[in-house]
Image (cartoon, rainbow, N blue to C red):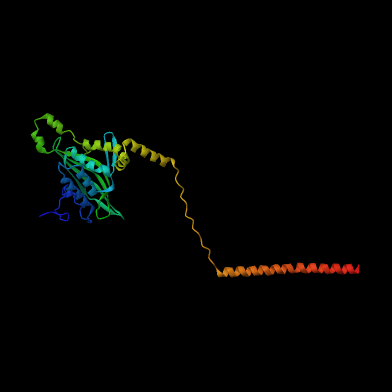
Amino acid sequence: MSSTPHDPFYSSPFGPFYRRHTPYMVQPEYRIYEMNKRLQSRTEDSDNLWWDAFATEFFEDDATLTLSFCLEDGPKRYTIGRTLIPRYFSTVFEGGVTDLYYILKHSKESYHNSSITVDCDQCAMVTQHGKPMFTKVCTEGRLILEFTFDDLMRIKTWHFTIRQYRELVPRSILAMHAQDPQVLDQLSKNITRMGLTNFTLNYLRLCVILEPMQELMSRHKTYNLSPRDCLKTCLFQKWQRMVAPPEPTRQPTTKRRKRKNSTSSTSNSSAGNTTNSAGSKKKTPAASLSLATQVFKRDYTKRS
């Protein structure tokens, strides 16, 4: 029996995970449950294509992921874009983690026109570490998610604020090494910092440099330019935007049409006729006066 792309058991060359799911509307918490299942299906052979497909399924193209926590040297806040999100999740497993899942308790949902916001004040990120020793780490904090209000319901913003964490070591391991003080001393030391491995922390520090370079990387990928030419082009365009004055916004001129009113034209014509008649009336006394003076002059000359 041959499988086709329309077969629900169809598997692509990259595995069954790469088949696009049928759009459907579900609750936001169920999307986190699906993400946990997808993370559990990860294998040691999962490459960059697998992680990119994972991010494509659960994150929007313009998604951002933010982590806030406090270390020994002060509070930290890291924000990465969509292109760096796949690598973030992969670094979690590269640091010795074998299992990763999120638990949301008493979350609040708010619906908007184009998005759904989930605010969970009791979120736990649970990681199972296989090395350097078998340890379960529970990282607790507040998780705020913004989903798109559509059929795919992908994450647009992810903000996880870490408050505290706990590292749990099985009692069986402590009993096995009860007589070895060196192993007990090693077990007493933390293997994470605020629940994050050194691989993840180093990657977040590197993202501070990589995030502003996304424009250079995309330009290099699109136009196949050298890194130096990409930098020159980006700096020149930024300089042009800074130097060039903003274009003044012209308000569109609206032409007003004059109304043709018969009443006004009639009144104007009547007013014109009135002025003409008044002018003629004014001219009549002047003309009669000139005639009277002429007659008076004639009579005066005759008498003289």
Instruction: Tell me: 152 left or right of 229.
Output: left
Instruction: Tell me: 248 left or right of 33.
Output: right
Q: Residue at x 43, y 40 (%)?
A: 243
Q: Position of residue 85 (x, y in %)?
A: 25, 43
Instruction: Tell me: 101 left or right of 263.
Output: left
Q: Residue at x 10, y 30 (%)?
A: 180
- From the viewer's side, name the closer residue of 241 and 199: 241
Residue closest to the far right:
304
Residue closest to the far front:
224
In which quadrant of the rendered image does the C terminus lie?
A: bottom right
Q: Residue at x 63, y 68 (%)?
A: 271
Q: Position of residue 69 (x, y in %)?
A: 27, 39
- From the viewer's side, name the closer residue of 2 and 242: 2
Q: How many marks?
A: 0
Query: Which quarter of the figure has residue 236?
Result: top left
- From the viewer's side, name the closer residue of 148 and 16: 16
Q: Is residue 126 above or below residue 259?
A: above
Q: Position of residue 239 (x, y in %)?
A: 40, 39
- From the viewer's side, name the closer residue of 147 and 264: 264
In which quadrant of the rendered image does the N terminus lie?
A: bottom left
